Image (cartoon, helix red, strand yellow):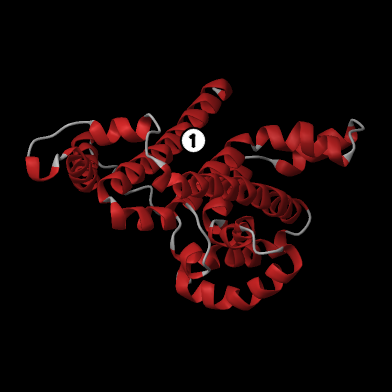
């Protein structure tokens, strides 16, 4: 019996109360932001003119850099997910199968960035980026190397929880005993079973990248968040509308993670 087996589970009323309190705490600033975007200024009253302007793309030439910034953020999100999946996932699978003694060390390295303030990361990354700029140029996509570090804790947890739910050694040995090569084992056996963890890691990485401001600002790169700061100086209403849409995209991604997980559980049951 586990140590926590004697602890009674919270009642349905307690769970709903906790969920309601947390929901209210999250809802208050969001409702305030929505109310702010609907104001008609000194005229008084409310309307949807700013939302219609943003959703129809009728922002005018002054906001063209905003479109470029959104493109930069989407490109950064794609490259960051690619970096995480290409470097982190094979390393975790290798450690799980062949080097279990290094599991604690890998966990420590992957979780370390969450305890380091962004400003400290930028100070450490600045000399590295001077070399990166000389080798690959100073394009905004190079920020993906830094973002790949800050999303490591979230991506690691998402993939690791999926790995622990699988008997990876048995799956691999069964496929190898049937004559499958290692590429076939990875593509046709491991990746389908890790689908939930990979999707969760990818979606969380995208949400983190779309909300990141400090590193891009201090390294003088333009992304969605730095562009919103610039826009907010001229039109704070439009900046808040765009921030809400970015939050909505993050919520949709998190809901997609839960839906994928439920779909997988139903198939296995």
Q: Is residue 248 left or right of residue 193?
A: left
Question: Residue 99 sits in which quadrant?
Answer: bottom right
Q: Is residue 14 left or right of residue 209?
A: left
Q: Is residue 155 left or right of residue 55?
A: right
Q: Residue 10: in sight, yes or no? A: yes
The correct choice, above or below, for 204 with respect to 219 in the image is above
Question: Residue 250 sits in which quadrant?
Answer: top left
Image location (x, y in percent) of residue 29: 21, 48
Q: Residue at x 67, y 54 (%)?
A: 88
| Label 1 packing within 10 angstroms: few (<14), some (14-19), many (20+) | some
State the quadrant of the C terminus: top right
Looking at the picture, tell me which residue is in the foreground, 39 or 184. 39
Q: Residue 1: in sight, yes or no? A: no
Residue that mark 1 sits on:
257
Image location (x, y in percent) of residue 121: 53, 72
Image location (x, y in percent) of residue 254: 44, 38
Image location (x, y in percent) of residue 142: 64, 60
Looking at the picture, tell me which residue is in the foreground, 75 or 94. 75
């Amino acid at each position: 019996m586990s140590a926590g087996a004697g602890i009674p589970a919270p009642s349905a009323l307690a769970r709903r109360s906790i969920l309601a309190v947390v929901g209210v705490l999250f809802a208050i600033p969001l409702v305030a932001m929505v109310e702010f975007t609907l104001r008609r200024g000194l005229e008084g009253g409310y309307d949807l003119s700013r939302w219609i302007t943003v959703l129809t793309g009728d922002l005018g030439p002054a906001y063209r850099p905003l479109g470029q910034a959104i493109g930069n953020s989407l490109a950064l999100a794609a490259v960051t997910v690619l970096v995480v999946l290409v470097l982190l996932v094979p390393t975790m699978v290798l450690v799980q199968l062949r080097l279990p003694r290094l599991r604690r060390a890998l966990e420590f390295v992957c979780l370390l960035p969450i305890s380091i303030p962004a400003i400290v990361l930028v100070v450490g990354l600045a000399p590295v980026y001077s070399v990166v700029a000389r080798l690959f140029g100073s394009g905004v996509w190079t920020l993906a190397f830094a973002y790949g570090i800050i999303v490591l804790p979230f991506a690691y947890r998402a993939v690791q929880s999926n790995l622990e739910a699988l008997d990876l050694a048995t799956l691999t040995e069964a496929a190898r005993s049937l004559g499958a090569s290692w590429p076939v084992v990875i593509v046709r056996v491991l990746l389908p079973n890790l689908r939930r963890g990979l999707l969760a890691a990818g979606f969380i990485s995208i949400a983190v990248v779309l909300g990141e401001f400090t590193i891009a600002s201090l390294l003088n790169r333009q992304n969605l968040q730095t562009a919103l700061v610039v826009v907010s100086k001229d039109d704070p209403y439009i900046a808040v509308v765009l921030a809400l849409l970015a939050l909505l995209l993050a919520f949709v991604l998190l809901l997609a993670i839960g839906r994928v997980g439920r779909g997988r559980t139903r198939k296995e049951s």
